Image (cartoon, grey):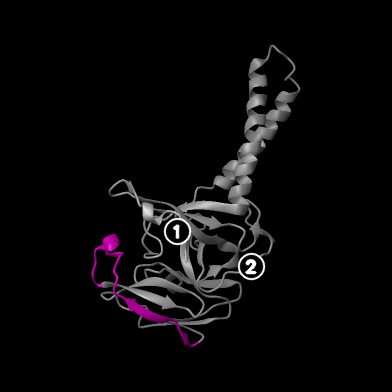
Amino acid sequence: MNSIDLEFILVLLIFISFVLILVTKKNNNNKSIKSLSWLNYQARSFLPILIIVLILRSFIAEPFRIPSGSMIPTLLIGDYILVNKYKYGIRMPITKSKIIKISNPIKGDVIVFRYPGNEKINFIKRVIGIPGDIIRYEDKNIYVNDTLFVKTKKNDHQYSGEFERPEIELYSENNNDKVYNVLNDNMSPATNGKYVVPQGKYFVMGDNRDHSSDSRYWGFVPEENLVGKAFLIWMSFNSNTYSLKYKRIGHSIK
């Protein structure tokens, strides 16, 4: 998910509005300078709106669009989601420094984070391991601290239309706290490996297990890169047919 630095733009617009209000205030009573009066009025009108948008987006919730299939079947291409920005702590706009600690991600959370390889890009994956966990991925099975995440094959292949590949199978995975759906591609080799999650970092994977760029390939997610927890699909659009996926609108993200 490409990131436009809207926070920076909002802060810049708020700063410009303040400057315009201060600069034009002295001349605001001069009836002959109509342009300055108009600028003062516009700045005063837009400033509260800009501040409210900045607060909502920085501290409450932020919308994102899903551009890839790495989280199928949980999230489909064209889903528009909302991310809880305060779930893992309140951070300052632009600097991203945490000012209030609230909670930490737990195994099974679907999180948005700034990709460690390029922090201008946002990724979305599922948390598999938290600090201190030992992860093993063997023959497309996950073991966390030697405990298997049990998978159960599901015959209802309702997502086949998203990829049209019958060799991709749908499973229900139980991480002993949460149950969610994942995909495995029988034509792709297993990416086996063992990983020890360092303090302050998280191990993440896509639910589309064999078609996801995740911690198996580029490493762990630092705590400071967390953006928030995905919790709701508020819109879903099929770009191929230019139609809305009404049945997905309003679904919570598990």
Sequence-first tag of 2 and 1: 2
Residue 69: give x, y in percent of width and height.
36, 61
- In the image, which disc is placed on residue 103? 2
Above or below, 73 relative to 83: below
**Residue at horizontal 62 percent and vertical 33 percent from the top:** 46
Q: Is residue 51 magenta?
A: no
Q: Quadrant location of residue 172? A: bottom left
- Per the image, the residue denoted by label 1 is 251
Q: How crowded is mark 1: few (under 14 residues within 10 Å), some or many (20 or more)?
A: few
- In the image, which disc is placed on residue 132? none
Amino acid marked by disc 2: Ser
* Viewer-side residue, 251 vs 115: 251
Quadrant placement of the N terminus: bottom left
The single residue placed furthest to the bottom in the displayed view is 146
Residue 209: give x, y in percent of width and height.
37, 72
Q: Give the range drawn in magenta.
A: 146-167
Amino acid marked by disc 1: His
Residue 195: give x, y in percent of width and height.
49, 80
